[in-house]
Image: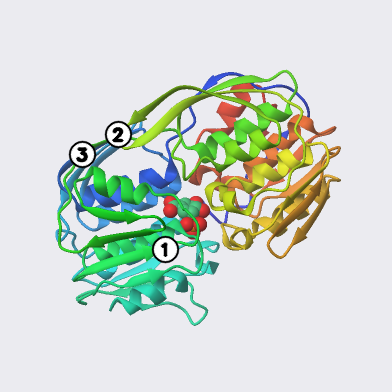
C-alpha cells in the first residue's frame, strides 16, 4: 500500500543477469482493457493482464460501477461489457491509489455519465496536477471540481451534454489525449486532439481494434461521439517499462546475457531501446510479431560498455517512464550524459529529477539536476542508503545500480513496486540480482 514506508530493498553489489524472463503485462494497456472492455458490447477476454495495484484499482472501480469482471487469474480477465451507457453509479468514492492513468483517463470517461462520481487517490496521486485534464474537459461541457491547487479529489458531475473540441495539448501527454478521446465518445460532434510530440497510442489502437472509427493525421487524432465498441480478445504484451530495468541491468553488469520475452514494441514506447543503443548497448530484437493491434518481440541483451550521450529531446515522450533507470545507465557510462526537455519528470509519482539526483549523489555519483533534466558524469557507484519516495520506478532503478556498486545499496519506501511490477524481487533475484527485502 502507498504510504507504507516499511518495505526496504537491500541489494548486494556485483553479479550478472542471465536467463530468460517475461516481465508482467503492460500497465497502460491493462488499464485500457478494463475501461474499454467495460464500455464495449459483449465480452472482452484479456490475457497477460498486469495484476499490479494500479491496474487493479481500475478494475475495482469498474466493478464498483456494476461491471461483471472475472479474474484476474494468472493474467486472465473476462469482462462482460455493459455498453457505453451501461455503467451504474458507484456506492462510494472511487479510490485509485497511486494511479495517475486511472484518474486522468477516468475523469474523461466519467464526464459523460449520467451519475456523479468522486475520484480519490493516495498522497502522491493527490499531489499531482489534474488541471491538465480538468480544463479541457470543462471546455467540452464537463463539470469537475478539483481542489484549489488543481489536485484530487475530483468530483465529476454526471448528466452533462458534452460537445467535441479541437484541442492542442500544451504538453505531450497520452493521459490527457486519452482522457479527451474517452470523453469524446460521449460528446456531440467531433473531438480532436493534437500533440506537440508523439505519445503512446494504446487508446487509439484499442478503440480501432474494437471497431470504433478514428481519423489520424500526423500529430492529430479525431473521433465522433455516439458510436459503439465491440468486445474483443486482448493479448497484453510484457511491459517495456518493466523490461527496461533488466535492459539496463544486463547492459551494465559484465557477463550478463538475458532474453526478455514477449515485450511490447509499440513505436511510441521504444525510446528506451533507441537511447540505450545510442549509448552502445547490445540489444537484439528477436521474433518480431504482431499480437492483436500491438507489435511484440523478444529482446536479447548482453552487457556492453556504455558511453554518455546527449539524449535527443524528441525521444523524451517515447521513454518518459524509463528515465530513472536511464540515469543509472548514465552513471555507469563513460563520459557525460545530458537530458533536457524533460520537465514532465518532475510531476510523476515523485519528482523524478530531484529524487534520482539525490539518490545518485548519495551513492557518490556526479549527478546535477536541472529544471528540465539532468547532467550525469559516468564513473564509480558507491554503496549507501537511497530514499525511493514511494516511487516504484525509483526503487527498481536503484536496485539495478547495485550491479555496479562497490558496497550494499539499501532502498527505502519500496512497497509501491507492487503498483507496476508485482514479483520484481523474486524475478530479479532469479536472474542474478542479490536483492532481498527487509
Ligand atoms: C501513461 C502515460 C504517461 C506515463 C504513464 C502512463 C498512459 O503519462 O508516464 O505512466 O498509460 O497513458 P503522460 O501521458 O502524462 O506523460
Name the residue at 45% across, 27% down: 297
- Kindly tell me whether mark 1's CB lies below 8 Å from ligand 1: yes
Q: Position of residue 121 (x, y in %)?
A: 45, 63
Q: Which residue is mark 3?
A: 232
Looking at the image, do the residues carrying marks 3 and 2 touch, with CB atoms under 8 Å apart? yes
Disc number for residue 308:
none
Q: Which residue is mark 1?
A: 176
Tell me: residue 98, above or below residue 80.
below
Left or right: where does residue 287 sit relative to residue 210? right
| Location of residue 345 by image quarter | bottom right
SS at badge 3: loop
Q: Residue lying farthest bottom? A: 148
Indicate which label's residue lies in the foreground, 3 or 2. 2
Name the residue at 59% across, 32% down: 425
Disc number for residue 292:
2
| Few, some or many residues within 10 Å of mark 1 (<14, 14–19, 20+) | many
Could you give the CA–CA distance between mark 3 and mark 2, rounded to whole angstroms?
10 Å
Could you give the CA–CA distance between mark 2 and mark 1, rounded to whole angstroms?
24 Å
Amino acid at each position: 500500500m502507498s504510504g507504507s514506508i516499511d518495505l526496504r530493498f537491500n541489494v548486494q553489489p556485483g553479479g550478472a543477469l542471465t536467463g530468460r524472463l517475461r516481465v508482467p503485462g503492460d500497465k497502460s494497456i491493462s488499464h485500457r482493457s478494463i475501461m474499454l472492455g467495460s464500455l464495449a458490447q459483449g465480452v472482452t477476454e484479456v490475457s497477460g493482464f498486469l495484476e499490479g495495484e494500479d491496474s487493479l484499482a481500475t478494475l475495482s472501480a469498474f466493478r464498483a460501477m456494476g461491471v461483471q469482471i472475472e479474474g484476474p487469474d494468472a493474467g486472465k480477465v473476462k469482462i462482460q461489457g455493459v455498453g457505453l451507457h451501461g455503467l451504474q453509479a458507484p456506492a462510494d468514492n472511487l479510490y485509485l491509489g497511486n494511479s495517475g492513468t486511472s484518474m486522468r483517463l477516468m475523469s474523461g470517461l466519467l464526464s459523460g455519465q449520467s451519475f456523479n462520481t468522486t475520484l480519490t487517490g493516495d498522497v502522491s496521486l493527490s499531489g499531482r496536477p489534474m488541471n491538465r485534464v480538468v480544463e479541457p474537459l470543462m471546455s467540452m461541457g464537463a463539470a469537475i471540481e478539483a481542489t484549489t491547487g488543481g489536485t484530487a479529489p475530483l468530483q465529476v458531475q454526471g448528466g452533462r451534454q458534452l460537445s467535441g473540441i479541437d484541442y492542442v495539448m500544451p504538453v505531450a501527454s497520452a493521459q490527457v489525449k486519452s482522457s479527451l478521446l474517452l470523453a469524446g465518445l460521449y460528446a456531440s460532434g467531433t473531438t480532436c486532439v493534437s500533440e506537440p510530440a508523439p505519445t503512446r497510442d494504446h487508446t487509439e489502437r484499442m478503440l480501432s481494434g474494437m471497431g470504433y472509427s478514428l481519423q489520424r493525421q500526423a500529430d492529430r487524432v479525431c473521433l465522433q461521439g455516439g458510436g459503439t465498441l465491440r468486445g474483443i480478445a486482448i493479448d497484453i504484451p510484457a511491459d517495456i517499462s518493466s523490461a527496461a530495468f533488466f535492459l539496463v541491468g544486463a547492459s551494465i553488469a559484465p557477463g550478463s546475457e538475458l532474453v526478455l520475452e514477449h515485450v511490447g514494441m509499440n513505436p511510441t514506447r521504444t525510446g528506451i531501446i533507441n537511447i540505450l543503443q545510442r549509448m552502445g548497448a547490445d540489444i537484439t530484437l528477436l521474433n518480431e510479431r504482431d499480437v492483436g493491434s500491438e507489435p511484440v518481440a523478444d529482446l536479447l541483451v548482453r552487457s556492453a560498455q556504455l558511453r554518455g550521450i546527449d539524449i535527443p529531446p524528441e525521444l523524451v515522450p517515447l521513454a518518459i517512464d524509463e528515465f530513472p533507470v536511464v540515469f543509472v545507465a548514465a552513471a555507469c557510462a563513460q563520459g557525460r550524459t545530458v537530458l533536457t526537455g524533460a520537465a514532465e519528470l518532475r510531476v510523476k509519482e515523485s519528482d523524478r529529477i530531484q529524487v534520482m539526483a539525490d539518490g545518485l549523489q548519495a551513492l557518490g555519483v556526479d549527478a546535477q539536476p536541472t529544471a528540465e533534466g539532468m547532467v550525469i558524469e559516468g564513473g564509480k557507484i558507491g554503496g549507501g542508503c537511497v530514499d525511493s519516495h514511494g516511487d516504484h520506478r525509483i526503487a527498481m532503478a536503484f536496485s539495478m545500480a547495485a550491479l555496479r556498486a562497490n558496497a550494499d545499496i539499501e532502498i527505502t519506501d519500496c512497497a509501491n513496486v507492487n503498483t507496476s511490477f508485482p514479483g520484481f524481487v523474486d524475478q530479479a533475484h532469479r536472474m542474478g540480482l542479490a536483492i532481498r527485502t527487509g
